[in-house]
Amino acid sequence: MAEVLVYVDHVDGAVKKPTLELLTLARRIGEPVAVHLGAGADSAASTLAEYGAVKVLAADAPEFTDYLVAPKVDALQAAYDAVSPAAVLVPSSPEGKEIAARLAVRIGSGIITDAVDLEAGDEGPVATQSVFAAAFTTKSRVTKGTPVITVKPNSAAPEAAPAAGTVEQLAVTIGSTSTGTKVVSRTPREATGRPELTEAAIVVSGGRGLNGAENFPLIEALADSLGAAVGASRAAVDAGWYPHTHQVGQTGKSVSPQLYIAAGISGAIQHRAGMQTSKTIVAINKDAEAPIFDLVDYGVVGDLFQVVPQLTEEVKSRKG
């Protein structure tokens, strides 16, 4: 069976959930080979093996952290040359998509971004995408070279399938052109205790209907009761009520959680483009004609200042 390269998204060896999803999808089209760059490969190997990695190609070099993405592309290209895979899968994060695009150019292959599903086809992997502001679902395949595919978080449920996961050192040569942009400082993101927005299984978002930043604690309280991430509409972000890093929409982040709750959000196409692939959508809005109700699974017509606190208390009482 052909091998499939899976780029590992991790923090010092702690493997992030989107990588486990990629390993699960990779098993549909071949044998997953994980590519781990940076420190912590030995500690990550057991997790990668548990979810199906037949081997782990590991490399560590200061260039991976001291410079922008180009050294990582050098390493992924080295893995590609060593394995000759049937496909290369990369998480659909901003960095992941840049790595995938650069690799596709280098190896002369087609690329598919933001896939939400993957299946084997007679002529290569077939990816499902949600396109044109989530108005259409398409199935695509790469027709030139080795498919390079980025997959959105929460596109598949991680499934354990223990494999060998043997760690092998990957020889990487960092090109002289790959160190042209140096990272001069880093600022840790302030910890909130909530899951990462794009990876969360549940997202609670607030919009213009909150009428001000002082009311976003209502959204945060509901999110915390559900163990959810907090999102915001473009209107709320543009008004300065919540940070841009939490914006859901066409000019913000795309999410695809199991449950998406929209409170005080009208449902403009800009917002829908970023959350329409959510598995279950619930909207709370006092306007019964709001466009958001056209795509929801469950809708509550009511004042969010009454509905959201009641919902929060109900969740807490059922959990406690």
Image (cartoon, helix red, strand yellow):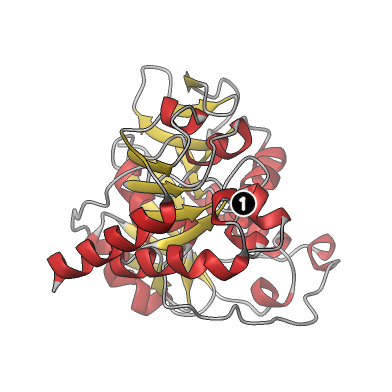
Quadrant of the image for the C terminus? bottom left
Which residue is at 48% across, 35% downward? 287
Give the answer, above or below, for where 154 lies relative to 216.
above
Give the answer, above or below, for where 170 lies relative to 79.
below
Which residue is at 66% across, 49% downward? 235
Tell me which amino acid carries mark 1.
Gln
In terms of image quadrants, where is residue 17? bottom left
Name the spot of residue 159 as percent of width and height, x first. Answer: 22, 51
Please tell me whether mark 1 sits on a helix, a strand or a loop: helix
Closer-to-camera residue (47/21)? 21
Q: Is residue 51 visible?
A: yes
Name the spot of residue 236 as percent of width and height, x first. Answer: 64, 54
Give the answer, above or below, for where 305 lies relative to 28.
below
Quadrant of the image for the N terminus? top left
Which residue is at 47% across, 33% downward? 292
Disc 1: which residue: 77
Q: Quick one: label 1, few (<14), some, or many (20+) residues within 10 Å?
A: some
